[in-house]
Amino acid sequence: MTDAPEPVTTDDNQTHLPERGKVWHRYVAIGDSFTEGMSDADPERDNAYVGWADRLAMHLAAIAHREGGEVAYANLAVRGRLLADVIGPQLDAAIALGPDLVSMVGGGNDILRPKADLDAIAARLEAAVVRLREAGADVLLATPTDPVGAPLLRHLRGRHAIHSANIFSIAQQHGAYVINQWGMTALQDFRLWADDRIHMTTEGHRRVALNALSALGHDTDRADWSTPLPPQPPQARRESAAANAEWARTHLAPWVQRRLRGESSGDTVQAKRPELTPVDPA
C-alpha cells in the first residue's frame, strides 16, 4: 500500500480565485508526454515535438512583448513519466529555476494502472501546488479529457471524472488555473488524436494551447478552439473493428510489453528544454 501525504489544510474555508489576465515572464512546464508535446511533430528536429506548452509560451511571449517585456521558458516534461517523477525531480528542478508560472500536468499514466489510488494522486498534486504557491509561482493545472467515445479506453471515464473533480477542487482551494479539457467536446473527435489514440495531433495541441491561454484570463477566439470539427460520415462496424484491431497490434501491444518488462517510452529521453531560455514572440 502506498503512503500518501497528509491532507493539506488552510487557515480558512474560503475560495481562492486566481488573478486573471496577468503577464508572466518565467514559465516552466512539467509533466509527461502530453506536456512534452507528443504527437505534435517538430518540423526541424527528428523525434521531437512542439505541443501545447510550447505554443502557450509563444502566446505568453507575444503578450509580454506588447507590454515591453519578454518570456523565458523551460519544459522539463518527459514522455512516460509517473506522478512521482513529475512532482519529484521535475518539481524540484522547476522551483530551482525561479518561475512565476508553472504548468503541472501529471497523474495520467498513474490512472492507467489497475490499482490507481485517486485520493493519493490528488493529495500529492495538492501538496505540489502548495509548494509552488509558497515558492511564489502561479500554477496551471489541467483536467483529463472525457474518453466517452474512445474504444477500449471508455472504461476509464469514471476515473477521469473523479480526477477532474479533484483538479478543480485543488485549484479552487489554492488559487490555481485550470485547463478544462473535460469540457472540450471537440477533443472527443478522433480526428484531433494521433494514430495511437493517446496523444493529440498538431491541431489538438493548438486548441489546448488557446484553451490554456483563455484559462489564464487572456482573450481568445473561443469558437476557434472549442468548436467541434464538421461531422463526418459514420464508420461501418467492420471498418471500425478492423481499425481497433490494428491499433491494438500497433500501439496497445507494445505498451503492454513495456509494462511487463518494467520499461517506459521515456527511459532514454531527456527534457527538451531544461533551462529557461527566451521565447521569440514572433
Image: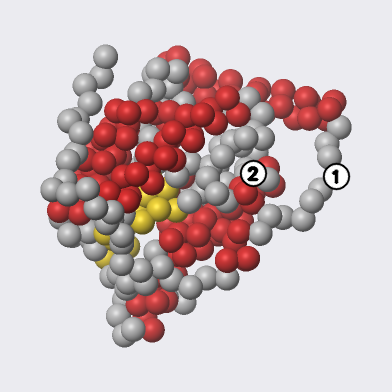
**Residue 251 seen in the figure:** no
Mark 2 closeness class: few <14, some 14–19, many ≥20 residues within 10 Å: some
Residue shown at 78%/25% (left/top)? 241
Q: Which residue is tagged 2?
A: 188
Residue shown at 63%/65% (left/top)? 223
Cα–Cα span, label 1 and label 2: 15 Å
- Left or right? Give the position of 150 relative to 172: right
Q: Nearer the viewer, residue 98 or 6?
A: 6
Which amino acid lies under the numbered mark 2 shown in the image of this protein?
A: Gln
| Percent of width and height locating residue 80 | 41, 34
SS class, disc 2:
helix
SS class, disc 1:
loop
Which amino acid lies under the numbered mark 1 shown in the image of this protein?
A: Pro
Picture colour scheme = secondary structure
Residue shown at 57%/66% (left/top)? 222
> Mark 1 or mark 2, which has the lower sequence index?
2
| Res. 176 image quadrant | bottom left
Q: Is residue 218 above or below residue 54?
A: below
**Residue 173 seen in the figure:** yes
Q: Give the number of the disc on residue 14.
A: none
Mark 1 closeness class: few <14, some 14–19, many ≥20 residues within 10 Å: few
| Percent of width and height locating residue 64 | 35, 77
- Left or right? Give the position of 191 relative to 182: right
| Res. 101 image quadrant | bottom left
Q: Which residue is tagged 1?
A: 233
| Percent of width and height locating residue 186 | 64, 51
Q: Nearer the viewer, residue 262 or 190?
A: 190
